[in-house]
Image: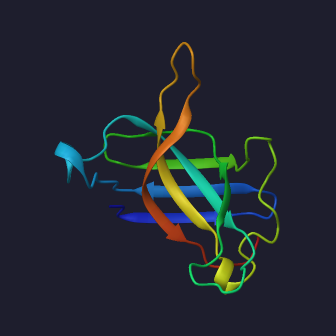
């Protein structure tokens, strides 16, 4: 559960996001604040609709933010570029129709080990983005 979320994604691929009051919704920690952990925001664009569009367009690869630290109250703020594995920003037509709205996920981070880097992991909050102006 998330108490509030405000996000602006600019056409240059930068995101400004403020999230407050994250509560865990599963396991033995249900209803507890997430505590000290790292978060990442992932944007998924959708591919073109292919007839018959029974299940809707498929999600493409994710565009991820930098990592952010969640505070003890379940809050974090982040200003970051959204990039895919190749370093590219989301395309301008990401979410250009009502049927291809992008999905924004708040995800935990699997912490780096000696043999593997930190990577986005499980998601626990999602939203469909609505179009807006780019200030």
Residue visible at 59% across and 53% down in the picture: 42
Q: Is residue 126 left or right of residue 34?
A: right
Q: Which corner quadrant of the image does residue 87 belong to?
A: top right
- 76 displayed left or right of 26: right
Q: Which quadrant would the C terminus be assigned to in this image?
A: bottom right
- Name the one closer to the observer, 24 or 26: 26
At x 32% / y 61%, what residue is drawn? 1
Question: Where is residue 58, by image quadrant?
Answer: bottom right
Q: Residue at x 54, y 12 (%)?
A: 114
Picture layout, residue 99 above or below residue 114: below
> As drawn, which residue projects farthest toward the top?
114
Asked which colour scheme the image uses, the reply is rainbow
Give the x, y percent position of residue 132.
69, 78
Looking at the image, which is closer to me, 43 or 16? 43
Residue 19 falls in image quadrant: bottom left
Q: Report the front residue among 94 and 33.
A: 94
Q: Residue furthest front?
A: 52
Query: Does residue 19 lie above or below 128 as drawn?
Result: above
Across and down, in percent, residue 130 comes to 61, 78
Residue at (81% x, 58% y) in the render: 12
Q: In the picture provided, is 102 more to the left or to the right than 5?
A: right
Number of numbered labels in the structure image: 0
């Amino acid at each position: 559960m998330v108490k509030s979320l405000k996000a602006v994604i600019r056409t240059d691929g930068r995101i400004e996001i403020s999230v407050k009051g994250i509560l865990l919704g599963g396991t033995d920690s249900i209803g507890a604040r997430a505590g000290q952990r790292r978060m990442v925001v992932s944007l998924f664009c959708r591919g073109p609709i292919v007839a018959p569009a029974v299940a809707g367009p498929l999600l493409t690869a994710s565009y991820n933010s930098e990592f952010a630290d969640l505070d003890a109250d379940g809050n974090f703020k982040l200003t970051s570029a959204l990039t895919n594995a190749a370093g590219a920003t989301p395309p301008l037509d990401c979410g250009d129709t009502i049927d291809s709205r992008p999905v924004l996920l708040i995800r935990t981070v699997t912490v780096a080990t000696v043999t593997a880097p930190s990577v986005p992991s499980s998601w626990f909050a999602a939203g469909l983005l609505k179009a807006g102006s780019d200030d």
